[in-house]
Each structure stands twice: as C-alpha cells, then as structure tokens.
Image (cartoon, rainbow, N blue to C red):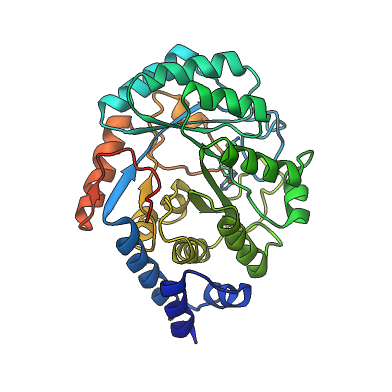
Amino acid sequence: MIKKILEKASTEHNLSKDEIIKLLSADDETQKEVFVAANEVRKKYVGDEVHLRGLIEFSNICRQNCLYCGLRRDNDRLKRYRLSPEQIVDYAKNAVNLGYKTIVLQSGEDSFFDVKKMVEIISEIKKFDVALTLSIGEKTLEEYEAYKRAGADRYLIRIETTDKKLYEKYDPEMNFENRIECLKNLKELGYEVGSGCLVGLPEQTLASLADDILFFKDIDADMIGIGPFIPNENTPLCNAKQGDFYLALKVMSVTRLLMPNINIPATTAMETINPNGRIIALQSGANVVMPNVTQDEYRKYYEIYPGKICVNDTPDKCRGCISAKIKSIGRSVSEDKGFRRNV
Ligand code: SAH
C-alpha cells in the first residue's frame, strides 16, 4: 500500500488527501520508506548541495500574541532586545565574510522597524552581493513592495496551520484570510515565497496536516519550513504535548515528494528535539540549513521555544560545525545563492 503511494508520489508528485494521510500514518517500520523516497527525489531534483542561510534574529519585540510563541506580547519573562540598524548590517557583513550567500532577517512584529528603517537596512545589506530574505510577519502590500524595490529577494511567512479554527485560536487577533493575502501579495510582487507549518499543535489532526501540504502546493511556495511544536513554559500552551519528531519529518518528506524542486530547510526546531535532527532531515528531503549568525548575548534572548541549540556559540563556530556535518554525510556546501531550481 505505502509502496504504491510512494511510487506514485515519486513519479507524479501528486497525491490525494487520503493518500497523504496514509503516508503520514506510516508506522515506525514503514516510515523509513517515506524518508528514503523523499531523499531520492531531493537528490534527483536539487542535488547534493546544501544551501546555508545566515539567520539574524534582530528583534524579539512583537505586537502579536500567538499562544505557542515565546516572543508573544504578553510574555513578560523574556528579556527584550532590538539591534540597531548599524548592528544588523554589521552582523550581515560578518556573515558574508564567513561565506554566506543568503542573509535572513527575522524578528517579531516590531513597529520600531518602519519602512524607512527596513529599506535602509535592506539597501545596505544588498551592497554585499547576497540574496536577502525577510521574515518579519504581516505587512501591507505597500510595505512588501517597498522592501522588494529596495532589493529583498525572498520572504518567509508560515501559515502555521491551514485549519482556520485552530489558526484563529492560537493566533488571537490575527486573521487567517489576511495571512493568505500576505502570501498572495508576496508572490505577485515577485518574491521567492517561503511558508510552512507547525507540527503537533494541540488538536491538530493528520487530515489537517495533509491540508497544509496540499496548501503549500496550491500556492506554489518556493520554500517550505516545517518544525515540531515545542511548548514554551512562558506561554499559554506551556502544558501542551511536544510535537513528534518523526511526524514532523514525515510532513517534511511528503512535502518534498510533492514539490520536488523547492528549497526545504532542516529546521532548528528539529535539532532542538533530536540531537541529530538536522542531519536526519537532510537525509529525508531537506536541502537547506539556516545557521544562526546573530552575535553576543542576543542569541539566547530570541527564545521562541526552550532549548534552542547553539545559543552560546559564535557564528564562526556554527558555520564550521554544520559544514563538517554536511561533508560527513557526503554532501557539500553550496557556493551560490540557492534560488529555487527551475527543473
Ligand atoms: N514574526 C515572524 C517570525 C516568526 S518566528 C512571522 O510572523 O513570520 C518564526 C517561526 O517560529 C514561526 O513562524 C513559528 O512557526 C515558529 N514557532 C513559534 N513558536 C514555536 C514553538 N513554540 N515551537 C516551535 N516553533 C515555533
């Protein structure tokens, strides 16, 4: 049964919702076949190169109040920070010197960084001949347009869950349709668009995860980041159960089977709940890693969830460490900007 579905997925890159659910239900014995199939499709379409993206977490101040996220507005136990525009550009420059070809700027929804400031930061970083990705939440079409004109190439905004009821429960005051509108606007403006979901939110079902995967395909996302939900003690979901590593991995692998040429990161959340999580993900369909290039004490204050890896390391050390791991599994670190392959 699983074999037949995998054969179809690997050749046609299309599955029905029921077939996806069957793959997501694969047990400990058979799930390995899903990972192997996704790894083969990855190799065939995007090759053995791994793209590294240098991630700068430049502000943990957020106006939103998502129930799962440690950056939520009402969490008063988090030490808040925001880097100055000069500091952000400086961290980016350091990352470029380490060999990064893509810089990702991520933050909470911090209104201090208005259009004028963001445009300035983007323009400065784009002078370094790198691809630039933004992950700064919901903005207006005009704002997205201004960032694009300033040189931003990509934008990450996860849908988190396509189950509208769950979305509105866990992201109070936010509007599901608006999130979709953001994704649509970004695509129309010519960004490479990244999205993704959390796996293991309370009440989330396999059917809902199957819908998430079909949604990624429907919006033709260029990048999909998938990570297990990790409960944070300073949030209302503190007592919820942690997402399952292998279920998150299956969602990621099935996404690869259905979207063979996109970029898929081995996410930090995967490594947080499994000490070898990123390597396992790279061998199950992923082709991207986003090492942290934030410096100093700020690394530990960007505490979306507990136990985040490498908070006491330096950008230099992280780059060396992940590069060695990538080589140890017979893969190589890409030297280009790593846009979505056109195959
Ligand atoms: N403010 C930006 C960036 C969000 S933080 C935005 O809205 O897009 C990046 C991602 O962290 C989120 O999209 C979410 O999927 C993930 N995240 C938040 N809380 C988490 C948790 N408790 N466990 C695992 N991942 C989490």
Measured along the vertical axis of the image, is residue 101 above or below residue 149? below
Number of disc labels: 0
Q: Is residue 276 left or right of residue 151?
A: left
Residue drawn 54% across and 63% down?
Answer: 244
Residue 108 visible at all: yes
Viewer-nearest residue: 62 or 235: 62
Which corner quadrant holds the C terminus? Answer: bottom left
Pinpoint residue 246: horizontal percent, then vertical percent: 48, 66
Q: Position of residue 318 (x, y in %)?
A: 31, 37
Question: Is residue 76 something that shows in the picture?
Answer: no
View extreme (bottom): residue: 1
Query: Looking at the image, which is closer to me, 179 or 14?
Result: 14
153 relative position to 220: left or right: left
At x 26% / y 25%, what residue is drawn? 97
Instruction: Specify whether 47 is left or right of 68.
Output: left
Q: Is 165 or 273 nearer to us in this picture?
A: 165
Find residue 112 and report its horizontal and vertical position in percent: 63, 17
In the rendered image, the vertical position of residue 316 relative to residue 275, given as above or below: above
Q: Is residue 287 positioned above or below 210 on the image?
A: above
x, y (%) of residue 60?
A: 57, 28
Q: Residue at x 59, y 27 (%)?
A: 145
Ligand 1 occupies quarter:
top right
